[in-house]
Image: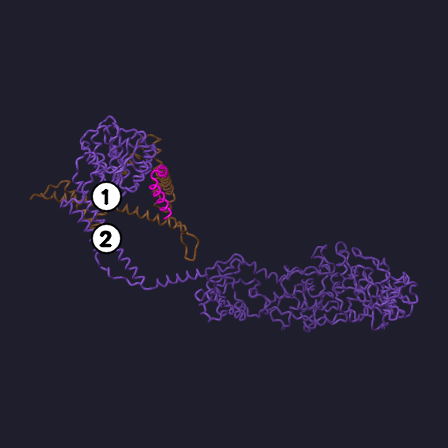
Amino acid sequence: MTLPQLSPDLIVGALSFIFTLALLSYVIGDNVIYRLALHLFVGVAAGYAGLVVIYKVITPYLIIPMSSGDTTLAILAGVPLVLFIFLILKLSPRTSALGNLSIAYMVGVGAAVAIGGAITGTLIPQISMTWRAFPNELINQIIVVVGAVATLLYFQYWLRAETTAGAERAAVTAVLASIGKGFTVATLGAIYAGMILSGMAVFTERVMAMSTWIRGLIP
Amino acid sequence: MASPSENQDSTAGGRRFVSKPPDWLHASPPESGSITPPVPAWLNASPAEAPASPSAMPDWLAKVAEAVSPGGGSPPMPLQPPPRAPEPDVEMAQPAAPAPPVEATAPDNAADDLFEAMRSATPAPPAEQELPDFLTKTADAPEPVSNAEPDVPDWLNDSAPAEPVSPAMMDAPDWLKDSESAPTGAQPATETPAAMSDVPDWLTDNEPTLSDAQPAKTEEAAPTWLSETLPPPAAADTSAPDWLIAAAEAKPEELPVPASEQPLTPPPATPAPADAGVPDWLSNMASDDMPASPPPAPSAPPPADAGVPDWLSNMASDETPAAPPPVPSAPAPTDAGVPDWLSNMASDETPAAPPPAPTDAGVPDWLNDIASAETPVAPPATPSEGAIPLETAESALPVSETVSGLPGPTPAAPGATDDLLDWMSDPSVDLGSGAGSPAPSGIGEDLLGLTDDLAMSAGVVASDEGAAAAPAGELPEWLRGLKPTADGEARPITGPTQPSELSDEAMSEISDLRFDKIMGDAPRGEASGPEKVGALKDVSGAIRPELVFDAQRLTGGKLVGESILTKEQERRILLLEGLLARQKEEVPISRARRGVLPIDRWLVALLVIAAIVVPLALGIKVLSAPSAPSGGVSDAKKVLDSLSPDARVLVAFEYEPDTAAEMEPLAGALLKPLAGRADISVLAISTKPVGPVMADRVFRQVNPKLSTAVQPTNGITGRWINLGYLPGGSVGVSGIAVGSVYGSPFAYDYLGQSTEIEAKRLSDLPPDLIIVLATSGEDLRMWVEQAGRPTHIPMLGATSVSSTPMAVPYRQSQQLTALVSGVNDAIAYRALTGQTPDKPLEAVWNAQASGALAAVVLIIAGNIIYGLMAVREQQEQNA
């Protein structure tokens, strides 16, 4: 019996096998092997992300424009550089106030994009779609509307004035909230079921990969 | 009787509201030889002379006459003429006399008739019994004013007018006489009845005749009333009080030297001068603070200064312990003219002691002190005149403000003032005690005890001097401690080196203010030593900060008299109390699970693993592969089949290696047919850092030519380009949809190689289809909102099974042209597009199905089991 030649595939396979078992060891509980494998994965992911940022963000959007000789590009590239420096200054309590500018810029832009997209890309099309389906799919649309409203009411805690029994919701609100709770439970259940299936698929692929690797070792 | 013209004020500068008194006030001499004063004719009219006709008498008079006359027939007796009325402007009470009815007489005899009627109504009392003397006595002859009656004080006699007084006014009260004779200078001659002594002196002092004695200097601006009070300068006749006369006659050289220019001397220990005209109360007041004391100490006292007020001299005497105590003033000699009440006061207040000899008689001591401040005073036993020369007083004040005859302001005793000021202004005064305390630059700076306090021990200072201090109560303690040094300078105030000593009485009062004494509690332990900080630093026995409010001993029952609770509040209170009680209850810790392995977890995991591994190992097909494609698979096929030649497809790889096992088969199934079309360009992009890696794996899997084939150079047609990482998340996606100022985001691939794409936005590219391979619904939503809506580019969604519920609404809203999900759709799509079956993929599908089946069974069984257990526990708790 000859040992297989060390090939990158063999090494990679071996590592994947080991780390797979290490992560699956969480079944028996938290242990050192699991934590070791977890930390390795997190570290590798962080390192890879850093490299990607350097090559795909800093270099093309900062270094190249500032070294291009174009004043306009240099100034445009300097603005994010200044914001970046301000953000770094947030590490010190005395200069942390300057970092608020960068955070404000990021939060403001992100909020604006998200809100604009949500309104124009989700809210309006969904409402218009629901209205267009009427009255062809009446029952379906009624279920959609009732479900949406009831789910929103479930997360509203409007209470009446205190009564002898204590503060409580109004009767109508309580009924709609219970319906919304049902829709919420069904949605979460569906999502959980899909997660189980996705996990099954992943686990299956892993098992198959390990089995393949083991078979590869067997001459 | 003085004529009306004589009523005018003859003195210069005088202003008197003088008018002619009515005639009836001026009684004519009696016709008979009776001693009655002359009465007006109308008062003397006999009843026979009654008016002929009743109509001549005023009605009111007639009514009075009718009411009074017993039978209406008795003739009214003539009444004694009323005393001469005073000045019209001076309201004088008419002598009380009965008002008998008066028969009506002729108009011109109406007054006489009235008088007669009044007399006849009542029996004429003996003149010496009923009527006052002044009404009965007749003014036979004006007595010389200068003749002083033995019972009338000189000052009173002095105020009598020089001109003879009419007999009618001889016996009139002084106040009456004085006011009448004031303009003319006539003095009422009185026999000084006992009642006259009750007339206050100040009233009788208001004599216009006094103004005659005004010096010429005061004629300009001194008011008449004031000038009238001045004694005549050359009072040959003592018409004015002596003290007033003395004041008027005071000479400048006799004025006292200001206190600042002369040493402090104790005030003369003499009371008011032995002047018959000086009221005893004045003299007694001057000598009130000069109690009887033993003879002076051997040490030479400062010279007594007659001009120093007593209060000031007393303070000086306190500072100079050797200063002799003041001699009590002697009561003024009893004068016949002095009212008894004045003489009584004098005898009660002052022991027998010779008064000092004033310069002028009649001037009180305080005036004497002011005037003769410079002159050395005789021994205390010797009374001295206290009169102050007029010039002295006048020189002290402006002429316009000087009251003629009255002394000027009393200059302060120089010695006393200097001594007082010295300590106040002495910069060397040490206001602090102890080491290290900075000496304040001025008095009063360190009142808060920031440095050493001003607290000084009177006892410490007094003990050093060894002299008797002033009687307690005269000077404050802080002032009492100030004593001049041997050289005459004030000794600096030093902080106490030992706790200050308060008087016993003060200590007891302070100790009574303690909180524990007020509350009746046991006294707390004394503080160790004096206070350390604050205004009471180094002071022992002072009030310490006491506990004012002790919350620990406070109970609500003592504060709240009554509380009103509603039923709801009571219910809540009971509920809260129950919760608190349960918190205090010990909860037994269940030790059954200690050290127990998670069997249930292991069992579940084992079952799932078995359900997956066994079919794979044994090749057992639990479920057959799906043959009929779902709606999404068909739609996806339609979309991909409808791509035009030279179409560009942008594929967004929004998944990571953890879900690659599920997404890669789906991605491969979708892109495999595109790899067979050489005219279709595929551009891969990702907002996740590891997305480009996933894209490269798929590209290599579906298009083996990418690894070895040479990419076309004429544009991007037929090229599969991995654009790499797109930073910014949703902002980055929005950026490529809107445009970027930094150039084309498609210019370089994930390896940094130029793609020769100059488009700056999606609309410039433009892709014919966007395929979003997303594990989470958020990533799909991001692309739909940021890229699909603004550009209206068709979008195909390929998601995992877990995110399918989140993507369905977008499919229903036609924002997604197709939606495929999971391994199941991948197999179906492969089968639909005629791709070769992927055995591993089918095995995965088989295992996934088996595992899912096992999971379903386990979930149902677990719900049943744990549900029953929960119900049983609830029943046990309820029981």
Q: Which residue is under mark 1?
A: B658
Q: Nearer the viewer, residue B687 or B147?
A: B687
Quadrant hosting residue B723? top left
| Amino acid type shown at disc 2 | Ala
- Residue lying at the far left in this picture: please name it: A1
- Crowding at mark 1 (Cα within 10 Å: few <14, some 14-19, many 20+): few
- Crowding at mark 2 (Cα within 10 Å: few <14, some 14-19, many 20+): few
Q: Which residue is under mark 2?
A: B861
Q: Which chain is brown?
A: A
Q: Is residue B254 left or right of residue A147?
A: right
Q: Is residue A60 visible?
A: yes
Q: Is residue B223 magenta?
A: no
> Where is residue B857 drawn, in percent x and y?
22, 50
Q: Which residues are magenta?
A: A127-154
Q: Is residue B219 left or right of residue B46?
A: left
Task: Give me the chain letter of mark 1.
Answer: B
Tell me the CA gap for discs 2 and 1: 29 Å
